[in-house]
Image: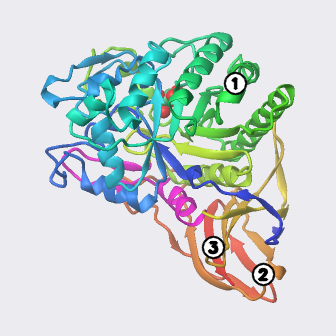
Amino acid sequence: MKAAVTVHSKFTISEIDPRLYGSFIEHLGRAVHTGIYEPDHPTADENGMRRDVIELVRELNVPIVRYPGGNFVSAYNWEDGIGPKESRPTRLDLAWHTSESNQVGIHEFADWCAAANTQMMLAVNLGSRGLDEARNFLEYVNHPGGSEWSDKRRANGREEPWDVKLWCLGNEMDGPWQIGHKTADEYGRLAHETAKAMRAFDSSLELVVCGSSNAHMPTYPEWEATVLDHTYNEVDFISLHMYFENRAKNTANYLARSIELDHYIGTVAGVISYIKAKKRSTKDVYISFDEWNVWYHSKERDKATLAGAHGWPHAPALLEDDYNFEDVLQVGCILNTFINRADVVKIACMAQLVNVIAPIMTVPGGPAWRQTIFYPYYFASVYGRGTALKLLVDSPTYRVDGLGEVPYLDISAVHDAHRNAVTFFIVNRNGSEAIDLDVSLLEFGTMKIIDDQVLAHSDINITNSADQPDNVVPKKGEGAAFADGRLGLKIAPLSYRMIRLKA
Ligand code: AHR
């Protein structure tokens, strides 16, 4: 089948905020313990952090990491994670029915972020706690010294403040599962007052208020309207979350779900505009899509642990999805959607980063390895910086109930003006036919293909593992050609492609 795309450097969507390629570490399962932190591991650094994992995170060029939760944050006492490690309490974590030894807290996480070349995006607990703890935490993290909490930080070995700019006001507060769950009005009031107090400390902070946990919540999208009505003038972002699953084993429907993601973003963008107009405001609020990923492979396995059948284990294997090749395509489509919505989505965090629904996995005492989904995330994060281009796309479609006509071709493009480069991220959703793709780039002049990478596999269920980490790896693309302002290439059935051109 044939598809055509037209590109022009002046037809743009928006500059991409590099934080579109963020990630997330929660005190959940083995994300922290035996994930980033394993003092006895052969690669452990002086802080007990695994160097092999740090290397992989650096490879992904992750700009921000959200921490410490997630559901975990809604009953978390941040003070449990400071001071001498031997005096830190072990707590029962009510969100995941596990024990938390608190051997990693804000100091260890901050040092890890520095080593991994990434920035912190911190969340405050607005579930079991509130404004007072939030402002104390902020003072501990960001005040230079001369106050109770900042002096405690200094006494705990960190002289300089970390100066963290990006803060989440709780997590998924619309969810009945959340410790300290609230109605939209209760949460909106609390978030507003907490934001006001945090801004009284530093008006330049960037604050993220909780939107819906997913687009199927009964309170969606009224939740967004009510919460923003309370908080609009004090916040910069509203957070959204979405997880993808294919329990029905229907690849075509599964890969169409990024269309649903696009509608979700569009609806919330509309609610933001409505509240902006209602308040006669001149400021903008954007979307922080701070949890997204495929999450379903591990759900059956986790049922017993999450039901508490095994007591309160410390760092059990939870949410350890083994990603297959089909998930590569899904993650590719999700990232394309964020790039194509870069005018409203400024932040997005793949949930999560290590071991827990993650691109990076570890074996305790053993190797760290890349899951299949590592690669589309890697390509977008490394090459998707610059300006998102508005593409005119002509693609054959297929029908999906509830979503209408879904294009077989899923594509986004990013123009890196500094390097004179244009990068395309492409997925073919068709299971049997290749797409003959014709891309018109006339206005860019003569271009050269400088990189061409393909992810393809005959078995959509194939996974990578510690023993077989290279079942799914990128291979050099073949057959693409640039001539007379046009790029021609064939996109194999159910494949992902990243192709980069330079003027
Ligand atoms: O990422 C796993 C969990 O999913 C997070 O803790 C929670 O915020 C969401 O429901």
User: Residue 323, percent across and down?
Assistant: 47, 47
Q: Does the magenta portion include 365?
A: yes
Q: Which residue is mark 3?
A: 499
CB under 8 Å between callouts 3 and 2?
A: no
Q: Is residue 339 above or below residue 474?
A: above
State the SS at label 3.
strand
- Give the left or right position of residue 349, taking residue 437 as reference: left
Q: Is residue 386 above or below residue 108?
A: below
Q: Which residue is mark 1?
A: 216
Nearer-N-terminus badge (1/3): 1
Nearer-N-terminus badge (3/2): 2
Q: Residue at x 39, y 27 (%)?
A: 137
Mark yes or no: residue 301 visible.
no
Mark yes or no: residue 271 visible.
yes
Nearer-N-terminus badge (1/2): 1
Q: Which residue is mark 2?
A: 444
